[in-house]
Amino acid sequence: MKILDDLIGALVLDAPSREVRVGRFWTAVWSRRCGLASTAGPRDHEHGARFVEDAGRLTGRGALELAKLAYSNSALEATIGLAAINSLLEVDEARCVELNAGDLLIERGRDKKVALIGHFPFVRALREAADRVRDCFPAAQAVPCDTRMKLDLTSWKRALASLERAIIRSTSAPNDEEVRDAVIQRFEYSYELSWKMLKRHLEQVVPDPGAIDQWSFQELMREAAERGLIPAVAPWIEYRHQRNMTAHVYDESHAKRVYESARSFIANAKALLAEVERRNVD
């Protein structure tokens, strides 16, 4: 990320981190100075989860080393990284003046496009002055930021369309094993693409994207269900079971079961695609 490259590249002097403290709302790193950052992290803490890889062993490390945590996929590690950056910034206190941040943003953002991270009381006035305001985390509870990358759903759409065509063809030739096998092969590919695209979507909207790699498949689907992306977890567990079976066992009876799963899968996968597409950023 260029803005982080520029910030860290501008830091000249390093210093050991004398203290690192993470609070509910603020995180502080004390090196040359005390640097602050607004604490960002997971909403819930599950037993065994690790949001900071070297928690308890950060004090004494160079602040420049901690600053590189700003690149982390863990929101909490990134918070520590930003606080470390702030602890090393040169501040000419002689140039500091007491000024309301809202007034400054309204003055400099007038008729311009403004990206704002956080929830502030001056947002309404800023919207009236600026050409456009992108307000990330506009409410007390964090929501997806407008600056996310839009997912390319083209391959997913093509895969599901191909599977659907094969299923339609199979209904007119129920005894054609080659057509049935084509349905199964397209189901395998479409299933893999569907859950991976779902994972990519969740990585854009959950508070700690880095934690997703530690989730089980069932936890991934439970999160999707809680967010209204899928109506139920159980069908997707069954699709996964049938998909895995195709890699190990293949006989006539199993082929029929996988084929029936594919017929059920296409409707649920299309519904998931439609929901992800609806939420996909512009």
Image: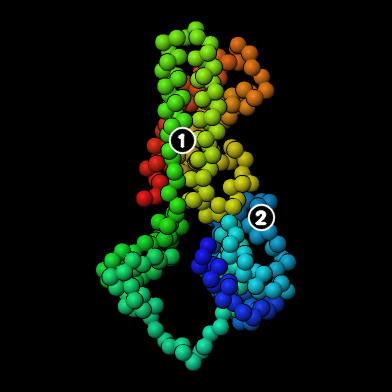
Query: Label 1 is placed on what type of residue?
Result: Trp
Callout 1: 10 Å neighbours few (<14), some, many (20+)? many
Rendered position, 259 above or below 270: above
- Kindly indicate the quadrant of the structure image that contains residue 80: bottom right
Residue at the image position 43 percent from the left and 38 percent from the top: 154
Residue sitting at the far left: 128
Left or right of residue 236, residue 274 in this image: left
- Kindly indicate the quadrant of the structure image that contains residue 61: bottom right
State which tag comes first along the sequence, 2 or 1: 2
- Kindly indicate the quadrant of the structure image that contains residue 130: bottom left
Left or right of residue 177, residue 248 in this image: right
Rendered position, 144 above or below 124: above
* Image coords of residue 68 (percent x, y): 62, 66
Tell me, yes or no, if residue 111 can be seen here: yes
Q: Which mark is residue 50?
A: 2
Left or right of residue 169, residue 37 in this image: right
Rendered position, 132 above or below 180: below
Callout 2: 10 Å neighbours few (<14), some, many (20+)? few
* Image coords of residue 125 (percent x, y): 29, 71
Q: Nearer the viewer, mark 2 or mark 1?
A: 1
Residue sitting at the far bottom: 94
Q: CA distance from mark 2 to mark 1?
A: 33 Å
Residue at the image position 48 percent from the left and 26 percent from the top: 265
* Image coords of residue 252 (percent x, y): 60, 11
- In-front residue for pair 257/114: 114
- In-front residue for pair 245/118: 245
Residue at the image position 65 percent from the left and 69 percent from the top: 66
Q: Which mark is residue 28?
A: none
Tell me, yes or no, if residue 261 can be seen here: no
Query: Label 2 is placed on what type of residue?
Result: Arg
Q: Which residue is mark 1?
A: 156
